[in-house]
Image (cartoon, helix red, strand yellow):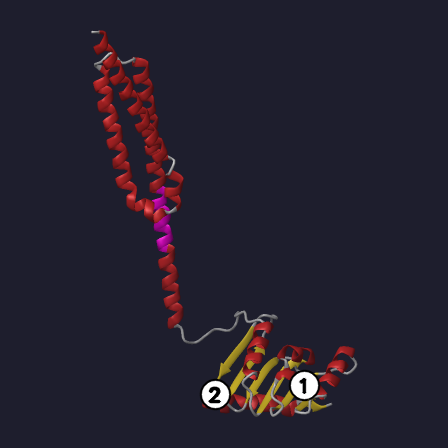
Amino acid sequence: MEYEIKKQLESKDNLIKLKDEQIKTLENSLSLKDEQIKILEQTLKTKDESTKTLEKAIALKDEEIKKLTSSSVDHDILKEKDEMITQLQKEIEILNEELTKADEDLENLELENEKLKQDQSSSKDVKIIDFTNIQISKSEILKKMRGILEKAIANVTIIVPSIEDLQELYLYELRSSVTMKVACLINPVISEHSELLEEFESLENISLRNFERKDRYILARDGEELLLAIIGNSVENNLVLHTKDPKHLRALNSLATEGWIQSRKI
């Protein structure tokens, strides 16, 4: 008789340990909640499955409690387990609410993404560009001019607002066979202008003229390529055209020629 009672108590202790392990397993599952929410798409796909798994686990606990209630197990322990299960159910509800919120956030992101795609599609349909408020900086223009100058073979015409801008074009790196006609503002009274003038005039393949309008950047290369930039009301607001089309070149090269003719010998 004593052996049977001992055996029964051991069996009940094992059941309680099993319940503790199962509850720890549930608690570990819930600790993954934050990570699930961060990866919305994966969490949303597994939401129903995770919830059902937890509900099944709770149902198993209920069954175990019902079985143990009929035995002589300590009712305080059963009450503690019931409270833990109730707490877990509350956490499941919170998880479901957070997942629902994540659903809404994802839906909003998808709507924003769709709107961006529509806006992009609409912008592609517009062939005529409005340059009124477009932002293209001086540094971007000079960088593009440097790239074009690297391909120069025979001759280039360059017009920039100031002789100081020529420093950004690395004219020393051009082939000695390339003839350069350059028009820009040159004020010999300004010491920096005077020094730069002397420096650039040391190049045998350059002709420099004074052009005071300071309203444009032009680079015509070998009759094959042209960049034209007209300075707008603000420093960054520049209308920029870049073309290699022969008909465009015939129409626009006159602007480069005009700037050179209007400039004065120094």
Give yes or no for residue 102 being in the magenta stretch: yes
Q: How far apart are the two marked residues, 1 and 2, measured between alpha carbons?
A: 24 Å
Residue 101 appears at what percent x and percent y? 36, 42
The quarter of the rendered structure image containing the N terminus is top left
Secondary element at image label 2: helix
Q: Residue at x 48, y 73 (%)?
A: 130
Q: Is residue 149 left or right of residue 5?
A: right
Q: Which residue is mark 2?
A: 248
Q: Quadrant of the C terminus?
A: bottom right
Q: Please, what secondary structure does the residue beneath circle 1 have? A: loop
Residue 262 image offset from top left, x and y in percent? 65, 90
Q: Which residues are magenta?
A: 101-111
| 231 over 23 or under it: above or below | below
Residue 122 position by quadrant: bottom left
Q: Main structural element of the magenta stretch: helix, strand or loop?
A: helix
Residue depicted at 67% across the width and 78% down the height: 167
Tally of marks: 2
Label 1 close to label 2 by CB (< 8 Å):
no
Q: Residue drawn 29% across and 46% down? A: 45
Residue placed furthest toward the front: 3
Identified by mark 1, the residue type is Phe
Q: Which residue is mark 1?
A: 211
Q: Is residue 11 above or below residue 167?
A: above
Q: Position of residue 70 (x, y in %)?
A: 21, 14
x and y, in percent, of residue 264 in the image: 70, 90
Hey, what amino acid is under mark 2? Answer: His
